[in-house]
Structure formats: structure tokens, C-alpha cells
């Protein structure tokens, strides 16, 4: 089965399932679905950053500071977070990623998707899928911030990153 044939839940503005469709149709028609963003840090606290391959269905060749992807039909967010983190990092045995928050991403062109944001510590040697990841490194957060204006980032990941920084700032002020 190709990625375009994977069945996804279609959700409404309140993240309630209202149907199902193949991923290819979901993307082509801009149907609202679910995805997960997982921020992975190594033992030293550096962020996993990667550039997507040019063959990706969405946002080919762009940089991202999250691993993640779509949530399959009937799949809970938390299972999708662990599955996607292990798949994209090329590891097994990660701890369950910690849920941080959820938001509805709007792309400015009338499309939106529900996005659950997680974080995980990855102390294992990574071996990302060559079909998904063209380049990767663990970078200090200061370097990621310095590259925000220089590299072309996936727009939903960049939005999630800004929301995560705001979330952490709000948590720190409590």
C-alpha cells in the first residue's frame, strides 16, 4: 500500500471523526485530519532537525524541527506519536512521548488539521528512513533559533515550534 492509499480519519472543527478517506484524497481535497508533532532531544538536550526528501507528498525538501506525521484511521494520537517518532528516527524502544498540547493548524488557504504536540528524549543512535529524511543532525536550540530565518521550514512545523515556545514560556511563568 502506498502512502497515498493510507486511510485517515476526517474530523470536524472540534476534532470529532466525521468520516474516513485515503491520504491522497485528504491532501487533494484539503480534508481536515489529524497529525502529530514530536520534538526529539538527545541526551544533551539538542533538538533533532532534518530536511525532508524531495519525494515527500507534502513540503518536500523543507527543514523540520519535529518528527511526526498523520494519525491513521482509528489510531489514538499517543500511539501515532510513538509510531511516528520511532519510524522517523529509525529506532525502537523509545519512551512514550509526553503530550504537551493540541491545536488546529490553519494553512491560510482554507485547509486545516488537528495537531497534537509531544516531546521525547532519544538517547539511542538514530538511523532515519532515507525515504523520509535527506539530512539530519541534533542541534543546540540556539542554532535552531538562529536558522529560523535562513532555512525554509515546513510551515505547520514552524507554527508548532512557535506555539511550543509560547507554551513553555507560559508554563515557566506559573
Image (cartoon, rainbow, N blue to C red):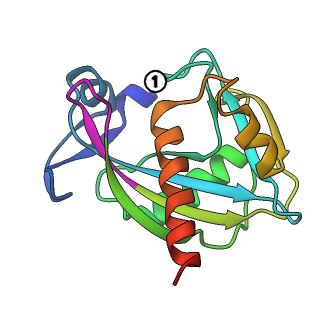
Would residue 2 be found to the left or right of residue 114 on screen? right
Q: How many neighbours does mark 1 have within 10 angstroms: few (below 14), some (14-19), or many (20 or more)? A: few
Q: Position of residue 77 (x, y in %)?
A: 40, 62
Q: Residue at x 20, y 28 (%)?
A: 110
Q: Is residue 63 placed above or below 166 in the rendered structure?
A: above
Image quadrant where residue 62 sits: top right
Q: Residue at x 22, y 40 (%)?
A: 32
According to the picture, the residue beneath numbered tag 1 turns out to be: 58
- Quadrant showing the N terminus: top left
Q: Position of residue 30 (x, y in %)?
A: 23, 28
Q: Is 112 a magenta residue?
A: yes
Question: Can you name the residue that lies furthest to the top here?
Answer: 54
SS at badge 1: loop
Image quadrant where residue 131 sits: top right
Q: Position of residue 48 (x, y in %)?
A: 75, 47
Q: Is residue 20 placed above or below 85 in the rendered structure?
A: above
- Residues rendered magenta in the picture: 106-115
Q: Is residue 110 placed above or below 35 in the rendered structure?
A: above
Amino acid at each position: 500500500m502506498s502512502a497515498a492509499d493510507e486511510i485517515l480519519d476526517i474530523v470536524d472543527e472540534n476534532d470529532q471523526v466525521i468520516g474516513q478517506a485515503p491520504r491522497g484524497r485528504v491532501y487533494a481535497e484539503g480534508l481536515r485530519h489529524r497529525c502529530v508533532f514530536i520534538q526529539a532531544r538527545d541526551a544533551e538536550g539538542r533538538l533533532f532537525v532534518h530536511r525532508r526528501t524531495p519525494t515527500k507528498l507534502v513540503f518536500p525538501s523543507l527543514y523540520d524541527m519535529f518528527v511526526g506525521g498523520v494519525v491513521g484511521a482509528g489510531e489514538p494520537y499517543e500511539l501515532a506519536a510513538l509510531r511516528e517518532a520511532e519510524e522517523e528516527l529509525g529506532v525502537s524502544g523509545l519512551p512514550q512521548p509526553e503530550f504537551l498540547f493540541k491545536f488546529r493548524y490553519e494553512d491560510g488557504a482554507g485547509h486545516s488539521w488537528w495537531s497534537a504536540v509531544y516531546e521525547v528524549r532519544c538517547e539511542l543512535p538514530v538511523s532515519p528512513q532515507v525515504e523520509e529524511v535527506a539530512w539530519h543532525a541534533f542541534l543546540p536550540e540556539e542554532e535552531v533559533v538562529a536558522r529560523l530565518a535562513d532555512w525554509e521550514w515546513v510551515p505547520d512545523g514552524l507554527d508548532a515550534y512557535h506555539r511550543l515556545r509560547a507554551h513553555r514560556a507560559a508554563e515557566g511563568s506559573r
